[in-house]
């Protein structure tokens, strides 16, 4: 299976990549090799293979999520460089304040 230079150029534009002529040639060759390998993998018989997310059977170690005592508001705000009576004051990051 091969991929054309035009297809690689279209994919690069979709990915907002500006590739030069040499880079397009190299990428066309590399993507063609990747697609050839994927085609080779598609020939493997996976009929009796159970789908999995990971090759090893892993289990996360999690603790129970139990509520605890919260830090009092005054104590939490004590070290804040900018605050009001109730909240931390931070610079606006979206739009005008």
Image: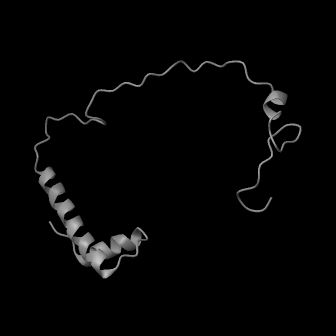
Q: Residue at x 31, y 36 (%)?
A: 53
Is 66 in front, or is 82?
A: 82
Indicate the position of residue 70 as horizontal and vertical percent values: 73, 23
Quick check: 28 left or right of 66?
Answer: left
The image quarter containing residue 17 is bottom left
The colour scheme used to paint the residues is: one colour
Q: Is 13 located above or below residue 93 in the figure? A: below
Q: Quadrant of residue 12?
A: bottom left
Q: How many marks?
A: 0
Residue 88 or 64: which is nearer the viewer? 88
x then y, percent, for residue 81: 81, 43
The answer to whether 63 is drawn above or below residue 83 in the figure is: above
Above or below: residue 48 compared with residue 36 = above
The location of residue 16, given as percent across then percent down, is 43, 71
Which of the 4 image quadrants contains residue 25?
bottom left
Which quadrant is the N terminus positioned in? bottom left
Say if 42 sits above or below 47 in the image.
Answer: below
Residue at position x 27%, y 30% from top? 56
For the C terminus, give its image quadrant: bottom right
């Amino acid at each position: 299976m091969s991929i054309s230079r035009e297809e690689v150029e279209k994919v690069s534009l979709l990915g907002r990549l500006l590739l030069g002529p040499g880079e397009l040639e190299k990428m066309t060759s590399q993507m063609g090799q990747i697609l050839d390998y994927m085609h080779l993998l598609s020939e493997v018989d996976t009929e009796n293979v159970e789908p999995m997310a990971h090759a090893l059977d892993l289990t996360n170690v999690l603790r129970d999520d139990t509520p605890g005592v919260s830090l009092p508001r005054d104590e939490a705000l004590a070290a804040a460089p900018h605050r009001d009576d109730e909240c931390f004051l931070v610079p606006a990051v979206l739009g005008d304040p």
